[in-house]
Image (cartoon, rainbow, N blue to C red):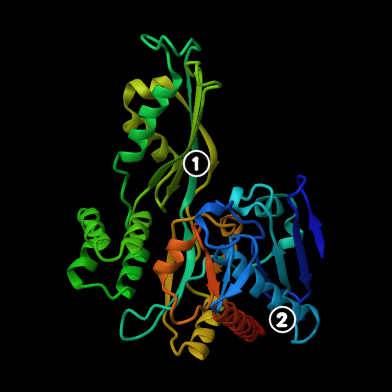
Amino acid sequence: GVVVEPAPGRQSVVYRIPGTTPGAPALALVPHLDVVPANVSGWSCDPFAADIREGYVWGRGALDMLNITAAMAVVFKQYLDGDVPPLPGDLVLAAVADEEAGGRLGAEHLVEHEWPLVACDFLLTEVAAPTFHRTPDPSLPVTVGEKGPGWRQVHAVGTPSHASQPFGSDNALLALADATVRLGTTPTPVAIDDGWSSFVDALGLPGDLADALKDPDRVDDAIEELALTEPALARWAHACTHMTVAPTVMRAGTKANTIADTATLSVDIRVLPGQSQDDVDAHIRKAMGEFLADRVEIEPIVVGPATRSDAAGSLWEAIADAAEQHIGTRTLVPMMIPVATDARFFRQRGVTAYGVGWFDDDTNLADIIGMFHGNDERVSVTSVNRTVTFLESVLRNFGIRTAG
């Protein structure tokens, strides 16, 4: 394999196994290696011990996405060791760094500066979701697209002075606090497409509620209703139908007895297909009002469009084949996710990218949503083993379908 390290501590590892047929489509497996931090005080175990108890692997990254990373490594090694016949096209494993920090020093670097290493036509990565059993016929969600990042930093500048005399002071923190509240509470633009509508249909919700979730004029009330019984699904529904704006980190001042002369706010913003960065800026100006918009400076941090792959083609059919073999259904639900993944860099190169896995029957979407970046993150050993089995089948089926 080749180790790529564009910055100290940001190592990605890439392997490539040549295919047997020149011109056959290449498939890449692209898991990430990094995880987000964990506050130990909120956990019932050491978040970095990877303890196995009660049939689960406990630890930060168990669901995001080291379960898939481990499964992909196991499956790829079978091809690397020659335990299974090679695919017609090249098979790539790119285990990347930096995904949780935006991907600039991981997948984005590989796509922009090391493309021959990772060049592919199809790609598998995150996010995997459990099988839906909410309708008479089961269905398997497959991630086909994701919202685009519109992260911003908001900067305010004031005048330092002694905090014992705050009257008439120019306090940057107060300006930023006002901006924070406005950004966090102003309703955001709605965008609903056919993909969301088909996803709602697979949820098996009552007819009136399902119809309202697909109606731009009624979706907000529908989400409020859904939150009464399924709060995690309501959060997902809101994120999949709205531009989202979440103030996350504020830094201000230098000392407790000094009026803050600088203050900075980090804002996580995500856009849906059809929403642009201009729409983000327009919403920020609307939310903050003319005075605050002139009082602060807005800086783009990580930006990009929403991306989506077609739910069709040889890899899609290979996934359907595997679903039929193991779950008893060929019904796949194209899923748009509210988070950003490394798939977006490859989609912008024309690569068809999906996220898929196979969980145990007791895991549901609410479990996944609640534990991503949360306390006591865990995944069942059964789910990890099932995902290995499922990916083995997907790759084998893909080889059959691309054999020409």
Q: Quadrant of the C terminus?
A: bottom right
Amino acid type, label 2? Leu
**Percent position of residue 231, x then y:** 31, 61
User: Does residue 93 appear to the left or right of 341 in the view shown?
Assistant: right
**Percent position of residue 25, x then y:** 67, 73
Quadrant of residue 13 within the rendered picture: bottom right
Is residue 205 visible to the viewer in this orientation of the structure? yes
Quadrant of residue 223 within the rendered picture: bottom left
Rendered position, 168 above or below 40: above
Q: CA distance from mark 1 to mark 2?
A: 39 Å
Q: Quadrant of the N terminus?
A: bottom right
Quadrant of residue 335 within the rendered picture: bottom left
N-terminal label among 1 and 2: 2
Amino acid type, label 1? Trp
Depth check: 94 or 10 in front? 10
Q: Residue at x 55, y 57 (%)?
A: 341
Q: Which mark is residue 151?
A: 1
Label 2: few (<14), some or many (≥20) within 10 Å?
Answer: many
Rendered position, 14 above or below 243: below
